[in-house]
Amino acid sequence: MHTQSTQRSNRQSNSAHAHHHSPHHSPHHSPNIMLVLGVRVARLATSAGQYKGYKAVVASIAGRAAAAAAAPTIASQHRLASSSRNNQETAHTPSAKQQQQQEEQQDEAVPTAAPTIQQQVVRAIPGIVACGAVMELGFAAADQLGQVLLAVQGIEGAGKSPISGIPLAIIMGMLIKNSPLWSRAAPLGPGISFCKDKLLKAGIVCVGAKLSALEVAAVGAAGVPAALAAVSVGLLTVPRLARAFGLPEKMGALIATGTSICGVTAISALSPAIRATQTDTAFAVANVVAFGTINMLLMPYMAHALLPTSEQAGIFLGLAVHDTAQVVGSALTYQQLYADDVAFQAAVVTKLSRNMLLVGVIPYMTWAYADKTNGGNGSNSSSGSSSGAGNKVPGPAAAATAAVGAAGAAASTATTRSALHTVAHNLRKYVPSFVIGFASMSLARSIGDYTLAEAGMAYGLLDKEAWRQVVNTVSGDVGSRVLLGTAMAAVGMSTSFAGLRSVGWKPFAVGLSGAVLVSGTGFAAALALPALAGA
């Protein structure tokens, strides 16, 4: 009895304890505790051998405990699934900020209408006016400095200044570019770009009118070989010196052309043809100005001291000095100092013979520095023609022969058309249109001079004075002064001092070496003149 009452008391205590910790009353306890209690109750019931029906109760309790234990995992899975669906919906449904960004991107992607010609002209006007003003200042300063320079040498009333206005226009443009005022010069950009591109090319075409084959023929058999020798030495050695000093190849080409042929004009003509930078152009012009001016001042005295005849002195001056204006200045100095018109004429004509070589040098240098890769269509045409000729046409023999002949003719026409297209493409690529215009203008000048010499009227329309005025206006007033002067002012207004400092002294070492080589070749050619004339 005592044992049974003890067991009954334990069962009641355990039942009360289980009831007290049931999930209904203590929902915050872990369901694993209920499972442990159920197992203990089952063991007690089994050991006592009583209450067989209690096994079902225990099993029910254990089942509810297992379900309660699994409930958090299932709920967590449901929450994860719901969160995943929400994330997917959020990803597919952009927020208001994302929608605004997408709309802004779409607005930016919409191409804006290209500005009309009228709008482009209006935008370019401020820059063109600014470049023109700088050009006028440069030429005015050159005239004043030139007269002062001639007066210092005792030459009065010379009229034409020996200093070109183009270098001074470049210098003034560079000073403006690197001044604090440039921060407000944004509206000038379109006009400056127009001057560097369109006006420069138009000026090169007009300058072609300076060159006449008849004037070169007047130099005689001695002057032309001397000019060829001096120009060849400069074009062959200066680019190699530039490479040895580590300078850009295009800078070396510009220095070589300016030193060997005709100074600033040659640099202005070659620079856009080989797509040289403003830094390359500025350094080449600086070399011509520096060493050409030194030669202009020194060579008249050296020629008079070292060369016995006036013709030799004139040829030497025409070959040793860089720019055309500088040659005229040095020849004018010689004429005024020694009362020698022969030397003046020989110097001017020799310089014109050097200038004429520009007609061949510019296309050659353009080709030499252009991209050599050709995208010709010749291979495609060849394959097309062979396949067309090889197709078999069914039918009688005569019809087949006619069809093959027609196919061959069509293929030949296509090949010819493709070849002409390739030639035209390469011509535009290696010889720009303004270079062709430059050569054409020189040819027009030569034809006019020839017709004037033969019939007394240039092209049967203009007498000698009228033809001279036309040539001077096109090549001088319009070409050299207005167009090239304005374009070179724009080049100066695009050149930064920082870019010049990064290159340093090396371009001037190359320019000095080139000046010495070309001048030395000119001196040797002038010394050899009697031997050449006797031969």
Image (tube, rainbow, N blue to C red):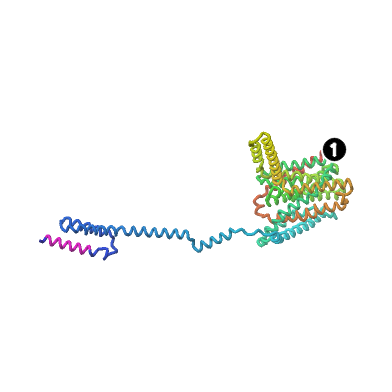
The amino acid type found where label 1 is placed reads Ala
Image location (x, y in percent) of residue 436: 75, 47
Determine the main secondary structure of the stretch shown in magenta. Answer: helix
The residue that label 1 is drawn on is 533
- Crowd band around label 1 with a 10 angstrom C-alpha radius: few (<14), some (14–19), many (20+): few
Q: Residue 171 is drawn in which quadrant?
A: bottom right
| Relative to 153, residue 119 above or below | below
State the residue lying farthest toward the left. Answer: 1
Quadrant holding the N terminus: bottom left
Quadrant holding the C terminus: top right
Question: Magenta segment, which residues?
Answer: 3-18
Q: Which of the two residues, 448 or 203, is positioned nearer the viewer here?
A: 448
Image location (x, y in percent) of residue 396: 66, 34
Q: Answer yes or no: is residue 449 visible.
A: yes
User: Could you tell me how many numbered marks the image carries?
Assistant: 1
- Indicate the secondary structure of the residue bearing disc 1: helix
Q: Which of the two residues, 197 or 350, is positioned nearer the viewer here?
A: 197
Residue, x 20% and y 57% (percent of image)? 55
| Relative to 115, residue 349 above or below | above
Residue 8 within the segment the image draws in magenta: yes
